[in-house]
Amino acid sequence: MILEKYLSKKGQYLENNVDLSASTIAWGLKAKTRAKESSDFINATTGTATEDDGRLMVLPTLYDELRQLTGDQLFAYANMRGLHTFVQAWKKDTLESYPTELRKKTEDLSTLPITACGGLTGGLMLAGQIFFDKGDTLLAPNTRWGNVDNVFFKNQQLKEIPYKLVDQEGNLSLSNLSDKLIECQKTEKKIGVYLNFPNNPSGISPTLDQIKELQETLEKITVPTVLFLDDAYENYCYEDDVVNHSIFPYLVGLNDNVVAVKIDGVSKRYCAYGARLGTMTVGFGSERDEEEKVQVRELMAKAARTNTSSAPRGIQEALTNVLTDERKKEQIKKEKLRNLNILSRRYKLIKKLGEEITSEVLKPVKFNSGFFGYYLIKNQQTATEISTKLLEKGLGTIPFVNTVNDLNGIRVAFCSISEENIPKAFDILYSIS
Ligand SMILES: Cc1ncc(COP(=O)(O)O)c(C=O)c1O
């Protein structure tokens, strides 16, 4: 590195440790190259939802609104905390995604959201900085998005304690997290937990009973514990028995030692990945008065002010216009439902195919939500070897390996392959030996 002598310790650490591809981009590029060489190639590496013809799924109502913004609306600075109209509209939108009986309680127990520049990634980074120092403990699941390692373990240099979210049978379980929490509180002064449902890469979300088990543990926690809820894929659920909204309402009001930070954004919720707008909402263990909530929000604004500053304005203006106009709100709801139905059809098809035959090599986990299917490898091969073979056979996938937790599997992004291509993709997948 030519800048070696100029680098800070942090700069050197980033240079030596961060995987810019977060284990995914490099495989995406390999798949794109193959797709250029052969029109039959199926690229199931991309974690954005696309139409059956390959174009990005966008929400026309939001797109129209963005096109009509004035120069001021697009280019003026936004408030550090987010446009007030936007954060109000976002809060309402989020609360409306919960069952009616959970709304008031959740509102009473949490702050107004605050915007984060840089999408959910920006929110995770800021939230991490507010609560933890280098060397502090973060419990992270065996199935997780690669950039979680970059943000929390490589940039912030937190200490990882892994928990098993998905077992070798492909089932979701929160028991290991509960065990680890109880164990950790004996030695740690403060604990962080990263939770992500629907999960990337496993496509798994919990049932209400599973959440209740976690609630029972959290009620017993005696050291300050911060839960980071990465809600990137919230509401993309395809089965009746899973909780089809953020689990945030179930994690507030449990215990004064537990704070939950909900991190969400427009990336997947409004199919606006490049808009780079995230939000953070803090939830408490018991009711707080307005002044205390404002103080917490101001702290988050201080973190934003000293890092990435205010978030992009145009998307906040456009989405506010949509969410505060009844007709446009109804329209965008329909557009979201249409997209969900397309993903749901692909999900059902790939699940059905997986139930009809068994493979010597692959075992599908019990995915039920999100953008991905995840397949564990039953024999001695590594996920990387399998993804390499699949690439040769005409299917792009992403290997996800976590050696600490014996996790070895590949991710198939049904969000970005057409329904028509799913049987073919599945045939390639299950032809692997
Ligand atoms: C689980 C998860 N969290 C966060 C993100 C990042 O979201 P954003 O693009 O808004 O930074 C992703 C993106 O793929 C993700 O899969």
Image (tube, rainbow, N blue to C red):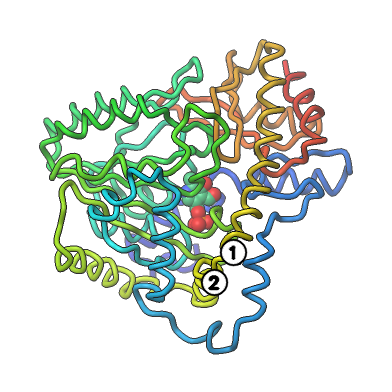
Disc number lying in front (2 or 1): 2
Q: Residue at x 31, y 50 (%)?
A: 157
**Looking at the figure, which quarter contains the C terminus?**
top right
Q: Residue at x 58, y 34 (%)?
A: 238
Residue 281 in sight here: yes
Q: Considering only vertical position in the picture, is 234 above or below 345?
A: below
Q: Is mark 1 within 8 Å of ligand 1?
A: no
Which callout, 2 or 1, points at the residue further toward the start of the chain? 1
Q: Identify the residue position indicated by label 1 in the image.
A: 274
Q: Identify the residue position indicated by label 2 in the image.
A: 315
Q: Considering only vertical position in the picture, is 47 above or below 155?
A: above
Across and down, in percent, residue 200 comes to: 51, 39
Residue 19 in sight here: no
Q: Residue at x 43, y 65 (%)?
A: 4
Seen from the viewer's position, the closer of residues 416 and 379 is 416
**Could you tell me if the residues under marks 2 and 1 are in contact, i.e. CB atoms within 8 Å?**
no
Considering the numbered disc 1 on the image, is that residue within a helix, a strand or a loop? helix
Across and down, in percent, residue 213 comes to: 28, 25
- Of the residues shown, which amino acid type is indicated by label 1? Gly
Considering the numbered disc 2 on the image, is that residue within a helix, a strand or a loop? helix
- Of the residues shown, which amino acid type is indicated by label 2? Ile
Q: Residue at x 36, y 46 (%)?
A: 229
Q: Is residue 346 left or right of residue 196?
A: right
